[in-house]
Image (cartoon, grey):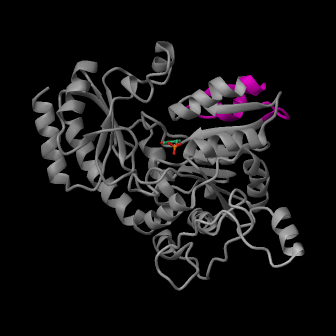
Amino acid sequence: MTDTPPPRLSPDSIAIRAGRPDSGLAPTLCPSTTWVNPTLEDARRGALRPRSDRFYARYSNPTVRAFEDAMAEMEGAEAGLAFGSGMGAVATIVLALCSSGDHIVAQRQVYSGTQLFLQGVCPRFGIEVTFVDGTESGAFAAAVRPGQTMLVLAETPANPQLALVDLAELGAIAGPITVVDSTFATPIFQRPLEFGVDVVLHSATKGIAGHNDATLGVIAAELDLIHAVWSYSVLHGAVASPFDAMNGLRGLRTLPVRVRRQADTARQLALFLEASELAKSVRYPGLESHPQHELACRQMSGFGSVMAVDFAGGSDVARQFCEGVRLAKMATSLGGPETLVTCPALTTHAGLLPAELEAADITPGLVRISVGLEHPDDLLADFAQALAAS
Ligand SMILES: *Cc1c(COP(=O)(O)O)cnc(C)c1O
């Protein structure tokens, strides 16, 4: 449980001070995997207490715990739990809460790793998954089977076409545990728990750590739920490394300024691309042309750093753009300081079948752009020269 100081601070200020109870201002790295127990009774308590952070590192660790507490405070949750990656969080929460015979309702438009896990791994354990169109009003609730559906899993904004899910609708679903992957939004632009969602999940590898130097996942929720997930997680073992957790805390302090700058630049680039005749469509929740722009305004306080452009010329133009940018780099991942471009059909989603690609609206001409912290004018010039060469 995090003790939030009254009056409640804005996330910008929480980001500056959260997770660092010591007088040293920099996050402290505690790499120890084990701790000396003064008495046998202390050892017994350490072994039995959920998330003991001075017993054995797989149970928890002070640096990891500090990151978890900070993230809980950012999301307005009672507690957090960190993992070795975003996929570590997804896999752990599914296997912690679902057993053979259980049912999951999941969004069709999700991160490819999440989709492959739900599609390929869950059936092997007898967990049935129904995929729904997350943009369709009422689709999640309609697919819930009372007594059998354990989890409802959504991602918003979603990979890679920036589809949105109505958080208030999701929060109103009673029965199953609702989970929202809020990676694209970060806690600065969207706080799903305030809409009644049970669990918020992040790949902190992205914007939260924010410097492409940590592989990290995290969830935040009520304490009882965190303890329930932890009791499986400690056996599953996809735990966060203290070094990555430290980089998570380091990144968190500048998260608010980074994501606002990125969102400002993203909007400029989105408008520029939208005006190009080479682009068939540009998806960015901050554009009036986004089919769910009104929903974005209702549930997000900013629109993030990621956009998707569908080039009319298909994969040839997508390839030329990705290979033609100079300041931006061709690489996967998002939320870091460098602007990155990627062609999902040929990279992140290359494992999907053609029919699945079509169902997920991933066209050959689709380019995903993660806008970084370079000067917007330099990025505009870079994109212009890459398009001129196309
Ligand atoms: C990257 C990503 C993940 C997976 O996170 P890893 O840290 O790479 O395991 C999950 N969800 C979303 C939305 C992502 O972008």
From this view, report whether residue 53 is shown above or below residue 237: below
Q: Which residues are magenta?
A: 124-149
Q: Is residue 323 magenta?
A: no
Taking 49 as reference, is 342 above or below it? above
Residue 297, image x and y in percent? 44, 51
Residue 80 visible in rendering:
yes
- How many numbered marks have been drawn onto this rendered protein structure? 0
- Image point 51% across, 77% down: which residue? 17
Name the residue located 50 percent from the left edge and 73 percent from the top edge: 27
Q: Residue at x 52, y 61 (%)?
A: 243
The stretch drawn in magenta includes residue 127: yes
Give the x, y percent position of residue 229: 75, 50
Q: Nearer the viewer, residue 193 or 224?
A: 224
Q: Quadrant of the N terminus?
A: bottom right
- The residue located at (67%, 53%) in the rendering is 196
Identify the image quadrant of the C terminus.
top left
Residue 68: x, y in percent?
Answer: 61, 63
| Residue 343: percent from left, percent from top | 34, 29
Q: Nearer the viewer, residue 257 or 248?
A: 248
Q: Is residue 173 visible?
A: no
Q: Is residue 147 left or right of residue 378?
A: right
Q: Does residue 3 appear left or right of residue 267 in this picture?
A: right
Instruction: Decide if residue 177 is on the left or right side of residue 275.
Output: right
Up the image or down, 105 lies above or below 374; here it is above
